[in-house]
Amino acid sequence: MGDGEPPTDKKFHFMIKATVKNSAEIYEPINLTGNEQQIMNAIKRNPRISKIKISKEYNISVATVKRGIDTLKKRGLLQRVGSNKGGYWKIIIKSRASLQK
C-alpha cells in the first residue's frame, strides 16, 4: 500500500484533531466505511450540503447516505445544527479517550 492508497480492508481513516491535557494538538485516526468517509469528506467541503447532493455526488442512494449519517451521529462524530433546510452539519472533534468505546 503506497501513499494515498486506501487500506485494503475497505476501511478508511478520517483524521480528526484532538486536544490532550497538555494542550498539544494531535490527530487521531478513526475507522470509517467507504460511504462514511465520503459523507464526512462532502460535509468537510460544504457543511450545508444536503443528503440528496451527497447521494448524487457519490452515486449512492439517499437511504445509504441517511444510514451513514445516522451511524456517524450515533458515534458522536457528526451533529446537525439548526433546521433541515437552513442548518448545517458539524463534524465533532473527539479525544482518544472518548473514541475508545
Image: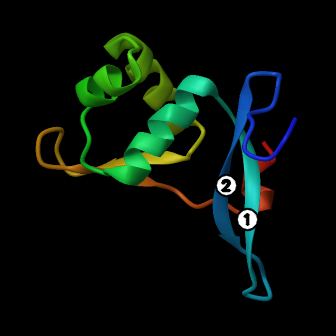
Mark 2–mark 1 CB contact (< 8 Å): yes
Question: Residue 69, located in which quarter of the rendered image?
Answer: top left
- Tell me which amino acid carries mark 2: Met
- Tell me which amino acid carries mark 1: Tyr
Q: Residues within 10 Å of mark 2 (few under 14, many from 20)?
A: few
Asked whether 18 or 6 is in front, the reply is: 6
Q: Residue at x 61, y 26 (%)?
A: 34
Q: Residue at x 38, y 16 (%)?
A: 59
Residue 18 vertical position relative to residue 59 in the rendered view, above or below: below
Q: Position of residue 43 (x, y in %)?
A: 39, 46
SS category of the residue bearing label 2: strand
Q: Position of residue 80 (x, y in %)?
A: 33, 46
Quadrant in which the C terminus is drawn: top right
Which residue is identified by label 1? 27
In 3D space, how far apart are the residues under numbered discs 2 and 1 (Cα atoms)? 6 Å
Asked whether 9 or 18 is in front, the reply is: 9
Q: Sequence order check: which comes first, mark 2 or mark 1?
A: 2
**Relative to residue 52, is residue 101 drawn left or right?**
right
Q: Residue 15: which disc?
A: 2
Q: Residues within 10 Å of mark 1 (few under 14, many from 20)?
A: some
Q: Residue at x 80, y 31 (%)?
A: 7
